[in-house]
Image (cartoon, grey):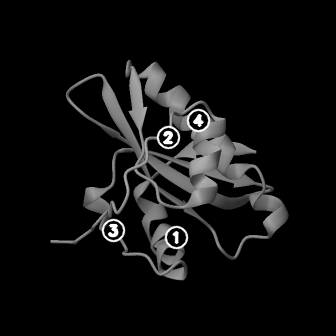
């Protein structure tokens, strides 16, 4: 597996991915400048973004995968993405990385990567493109 940094030309691809999962398509201007895209066998399979704060905390968010990519190419890509986001955060001097996630499979992958799961009942993450 390989990784590369997000470029503006990637936004239409990510928009298709979000639409395929029934998610809100985020305008490019709201995406962090630090996005990572994972590819396997020359096929882009997953992506995520590192959002920076003015503290030692950053957020890894907007995880998305290519629903149409063959399952065997997607296997392990989310774990590789999580690892790359954590490495990037550490290299940029952050001490804490947070994610707000609802998908049980992704939660488990983050826990497996060393994250502490803090569960809040009835919590909803809401998005509105202004």
Indicate whether 33 appears above or below 24.
above
Q: Tell me the quarter of the picture where residue 89 sits.
A: top left
- Which residue is label 3 attached to? 26
Q: Residue 37 appears at what percent x and percent y?
A: 57, 51
User: Left or right: 78 with respect to 8?
Assistant: right
Quadrant showing the C terminus: bottom left
Name the disc covering residue 84, or none. 4
Q: Which comes sooner in the sequence, label 3 or label 2?
A: 3
2 vs 4, front mark: 2
Q: Residue at x 47, y 21 (%)?
A: 90
How far from the left and from the top, in percent, is residue 2? 70, 43
- Which circle's residue, 4 or 3, is located before the other in the chain? 3
Q: Secondary structure at mark 4?
A: helix
Q: Secondary structure at mark 3?
A: loop
Few, some or many residues within 10 Å of mark 4 (<14, 14–19, 20+): some
**Figure quadrant of the N terminus:** top right
Q: Earlier in the sequence, mark 2 or mark 4?
A: 4
Q: Quadrant of residue 67?
A: bottom right
**Residue shown at 24%/33% (left/top)?**
53
Q: Earlier in the sequence, mark 3 or mark 1?
A: 1
What separation in Å lies between label 2 and label 4 (alpha carbons)? Answer: 19 Å
Side (left or right) of 97 relative to 55: right
Task: Measuring from the top left, give residue 62's x and y in whole percent.
Answer: 43, 57
Query: Disc 1 or disc 2, which is closer to the eye?
Result: 2
**Disc 3 to disc 1, C-alpha distance:** 12 Å
Q: Nearer the viewer, residue 25 or 42?
A: 25
Mark 3 or mark 2, which is nearer to you? 2
- Residue 39 position (above or below residue 59): below
Query: Of the numbered discs in the image, which one, if any, rests on residue 117?
Result: 2
């Amino acid at each position: 597996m390989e990784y590369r940094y997000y470029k503006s030309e990637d936004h239409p691809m990510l928009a298709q991915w979000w639409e395929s999962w029934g998610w809100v398509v985020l305008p490019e201007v709201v995406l962090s400048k630090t996005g990572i895209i994972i590819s396997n066998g020359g096929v882009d399979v997953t992506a995520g973004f590192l959002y920076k704060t003015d503290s030692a905390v950053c957020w890894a968010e907007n995880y998305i995968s290519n629903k149409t990519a063959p399952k065997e190419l997607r296997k392990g890509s989310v774990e590789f993405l999580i690892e790359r986001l954590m490495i990037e955060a550490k290299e940029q001097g952050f001490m804490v990385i947070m994610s707000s996630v609802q998908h049980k499979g992704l939660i488990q992958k983050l826990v497996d990567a060393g994250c502490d799961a803090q569960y809040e009942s009835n919590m909803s993450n809401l998005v509105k493109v202004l």
